[in-house]
Image (cartoon, rainbow, N blue to C red):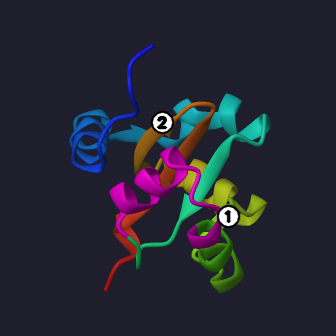
Amino acid sequence: MSAAMPPKDTRDKLNLETAQVPWRDLQTYFARGQVVFVSESLDLLEVGEALAADDKVRFQQWMSEGAVGDVPVERAQSWYDSDARLWAVVIAPWVLVQDRNTRN
């Protein structure tokens, strides 16, 4: 077994695996409850690192602030209707998604 990756290596790996994905391609994961919404105010890679490190404290804080959580059905429908492309990174079994099109 290999040792756990140092944080910088984790971030570099996640950066390479982050891509824009059509929301329609994520429907199966959404139906399974495996899609995690990440607010535009957060760094997607930072959230991915915290999830990979099982940092429950940070996740609880983000969740209580509404910055991370389930994708509301209304938002999912809006993304579907507009054929949205979202930034996504997989931290199996989760898919983190962020809609950067709504940033000011």
Against 83, is 5 above or below?
Answer: above
Instruction: Identify which residue, 25 or 11, lies in the foreground.
Output: 11
For the magenta stretch, what is the residue range? Answer: 43-58
- Residue 81: tell me if it is visible: no
In which image quadrant can residue 67 be found? bottom right
Residue at the image point whose x is 58% and y is 51% from the top: 54
Against 47, is 35 above or below?
Answer: above
Against 11, is 72 above or below?
Answer: below
Q: Does residue 81 belong to the magenta stretch? A: no
Instruction: Identify which residue, 21 or 46, lies in the foreground.
Output: 46
Q: Are marks 1 and 2 in contact (CB under 8 Å)?
A: no
Residue at the image point whose x is 33% and y is 35% from the top: 5
- Say whether disc 1 or disc 2 marks the residue closer to the N-terminus: 1
Q: Is residue 84 shown left or right of residue 12?
A: right
What residue does disc 2 label?
90
Instruction: Identify which residue, 27 or 92, lies in the foreground.
Output: 92
What residue does disc 1 label?
69
Residue at the image point whose x is 78% and y is 34% from the top: 32
Q: Is residue 96 shown left or right of residue 64?
A: left
